[in-house]
């Protein structure tokens, strides 16, 4: 069980001001994120919440640093490879057989882009049309800028087959690689807060939301999973992280295909 976090007096008012200033509801997150809020407060040498919020109000760069510090972006191409090969060998071909090659797909919480580009590589390999692109959303501006550049260190490509590295990446200096334009153009990155943005309903055949909700409170997870379920087309697939489980999936109109895979029931 997660240990209880005890903030200083005035934290409720600070959270309210953050919500007004930045449209971020800190109550949606687990205790771990609240600890990070206060670690950054100590780093900035703020003696109270008034000083903290004053810095955030006056300095856009500090607001960006605040958001970046709360976001935990640890990623690589084809993270948990067996999941991706299942997607390549069974899930996507099954969707193609049922729906054709024009599949609308979405990476929700795309971080620095490895997940979205991994999906784009699979789409390229399977000749999917993905009209007009794979959507990729994240709240972190710095991470999104990295994704747009598409430059990665070789350690992030550990799980990429060598022939795919040669086919879809350009070798740069100092062990860096850049994703080729044919893959980049398959993805559109957007700065979006998943928690307060409406989703298009009955739209997507595949939604990836992996290791995004692990820092959210149970109530926030429930709301977000409900929004994802509504965004899926009938028969569409929601993939979560390898350690994540949607316990009330039946109430959302989903059926389990395994620990991390859920399908929206057909009418």
Image: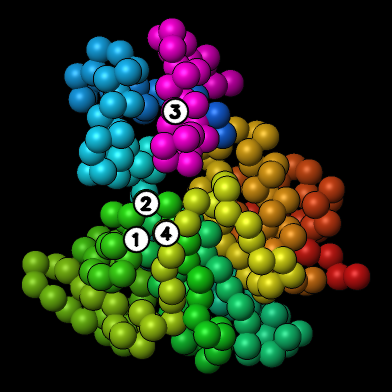
The one of 143 and 246 positioned closer to us in this rendering: 143
- The residue pinned by badge 3 equals 17
Q: Residue furthest top?
A: 9
2 vs 3, front mark: 3
* Residue 118 visible in the shown view: no
1 vs 3, front mark: 3
- The vertical placement of 212 against 80, above or below, is above
- The residue pinned by badge 2 equals 140
Which residue is rendered at x = 60% and y = 45% of the image? 244
The one of 93 and 146 positioned closer to us in this rendering: 146
The residues bearing labels 1 and 3 have C-alpha atoms spaced at a distance of 26 Å
Which of the 4 image quarters holds residue 40?
top left
- The residue pinned by badge 4 equals 191
Query: Mark 1 or mark 3: which comes first in sequence?
Result: 3
Does 157 sit left or right of 33 as displayed? left
Query: Mark 2 or mark 3: which comes first in sequence?
Result: 3
- The residue pinned by badge 1 equals 144
3 vs 4, front mark: 3
Which residue is rendered at x = 13% and y = 76% of the image? 172
Q: Which residues are magenta?
A: 1-26
Q: Position of residue 155 (x, y in %)?
A: 25, 60
Q: Position of residue 181 (x, y in %)?
A: 31, 85
Q: Residues within 10 Å of mark 3 (few under 14, many from 20)?
A: some
């Amino acid at each position: 069980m997660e240990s209880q976090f005890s903030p200083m007096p005035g934290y409720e008012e600070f959270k309210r001001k953050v919500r007004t200033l930045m449209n971020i509801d800190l109550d949606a997150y687990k205790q771990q994120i609240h600890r990070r809020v206060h670690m950054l407060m100590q780093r900035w040498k703020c003696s109270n919440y008034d000083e903290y919020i004053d810095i955030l109000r006056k300095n856009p760069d500090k607001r960006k640093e605040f958001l970046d510090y709360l976001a935990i972006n640890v990623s690589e191409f084809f993270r948990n490879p067996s999941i991706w090969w299942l997607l390549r060998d069974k899930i996507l071909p099954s969707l193609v057989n049922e729906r054709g090659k024009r599949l609308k797909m979405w990476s929700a919480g795309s971080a620095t882009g490895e997940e979205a580009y991994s999906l784009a590589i699979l789409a390229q390999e399977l000749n999917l049309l993905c009209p007009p692109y794979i959507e990729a959303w994240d709240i972190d501006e710095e991470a999104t800028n990295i994704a747009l550049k598409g430059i990665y260190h070789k350690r992030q490509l550990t799980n990429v087959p060598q022939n795919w590295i040669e086919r879809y990446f350009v070798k740069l200096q100092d062990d860096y690689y850049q994703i080729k334009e044919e893959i980049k153009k398959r993805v559109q990155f957007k700065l979006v807060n998943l928690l307060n943005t409406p989703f298009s309903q009955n739209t997507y055949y595949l939604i990836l939301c992996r290791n995004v909700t692990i820092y959210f409170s149970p109530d926030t997870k429930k709301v977000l999973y409900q929004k994802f379920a509504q965004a899926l087309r009938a028969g569409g697939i929601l993939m979560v992280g390898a350690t994540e489980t949607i316990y009330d999936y039946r109430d959302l109109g989903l059926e389990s295909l395994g620990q991390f895979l859920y399908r929206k029931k057909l009418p």
